[in-house]
Amino acid sequence: MIRRNTKIGSTLLKLMLPLALFLFQFTAPTGAAQLGIEFIFDVVPDAATLSTLPATGSTFYLQGKVYPFRSVNVATCAFNTATPRVLGTWRAWGEVADDGRLVTNHSLLLDTMGGTIEIQGVTGVLLANGQASPATSDPNGPTTGPSEVLAVTGGVGTYRGLNGEAQVRSYCSDPSRPFRYDRAFCLGIVQAPRGIR
């Protein structure tokens, strides 16, 4: 009797799966693939400790401050105002990988928002259509980017249940190598739609 019920259940599952997929394509939220940035910050490291990389396998720790987006001049990495508002503390740690890449973990403690955002990944993974671009009208001057992507692995407090993609775009940068978090950068969070894991 148990085998017969198992066979019936298996057959029903095979019949229902195509129907479920057909219905999903008409009920899925439109624009699910066109997600926008939900949170965006400027981050300024306290010191440029990784401007020259130590040997592969070396560990590192970085720390800096989180500011509202557009607090930093993208061409010079200087602040746009004399007293920018600090939102919290950025901490990053990890290991130096091959080809100038870093294996990183990031934690943003956003005191003013009452939560943290956790991020991890390997540097040098470029965002599609996120190439470097001039920071000023001078095409030979400093650039922003290119944009790199990391995984948002969670959050607490205000950001509880957060997951998705972190887009990192360096300011006043050298686009010829993976970003080393040795200068100011922009951090945008694109949250995955609910229900997609």
Image (tube, grey):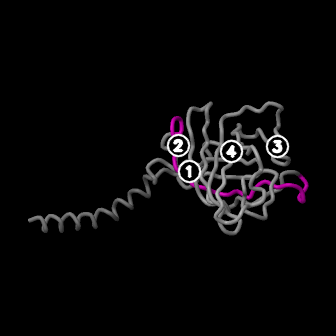
Q: Position of residue 41 (x, y in %)?
A: 68, 42
Judging depth in this view, the residue of 129 and 151 nearest the camera is 151
The answer to whether the residue labelled 2 contacts the one labelled 1, judged by CB atoms less than 8 Å apart, is: yes
Q: Position of residue 91 (x, y in %)?
A: 64, 45
**Corner quadrant of residue 114:** top right
Judging depth in this view, the residue of 82 and 53 nearest the camera is 53
Q: Which residue corresponds to mark 2?
A: 155
How crowded pointer 2 is (Cα within 10 Å; few <14, some 14-19, many 20+) is rated as: some
Q: Position of residue 112 (x, y in %)?
A: 62, 30
**Disc on the earlier residue, 3 or 1:** 3
The answer to whether the residue labelled 3 contacts the one labelled 2, judged by CB atoms less than 8 Å apart, is: no
Q: Which mark is residue 63?
A: 4
**Disc on the earlier residue, 2 or 4:** 4
Q: What is the secondary structure assignment of the residue under circle 1?
A: strand
Residue at 59 percent across and 49 percent down: it is 190
Which mark is nearer the camera, 1 or 4?
A: 4
Q: Is residue 63 left or right of residue 138?
A: left
Q: Which residue corresponds to mark 3?
A: 73
Q: Quadrant of the C terminus?
A: bottom left
Q: Which mark is residue 14?
A: none
The answer to whether the residue labelled 4 contacts the one labelled 3, judged by CB atoms less than 8 Å apart, is: no
Amino acid on which the number 2 mark rests in the picture: Gly
Amino acid on which the number 3 mark rests in the picture: Asn
Q: What is the secondary structure assignment of the residue under circle 2?
A: strand
What is the spatial separation of the Cα atoms under label 1 and label 4, in whole angstroms? Answer: 18 Å
Amino acid on which the number 1 mark rests in the picture: Val
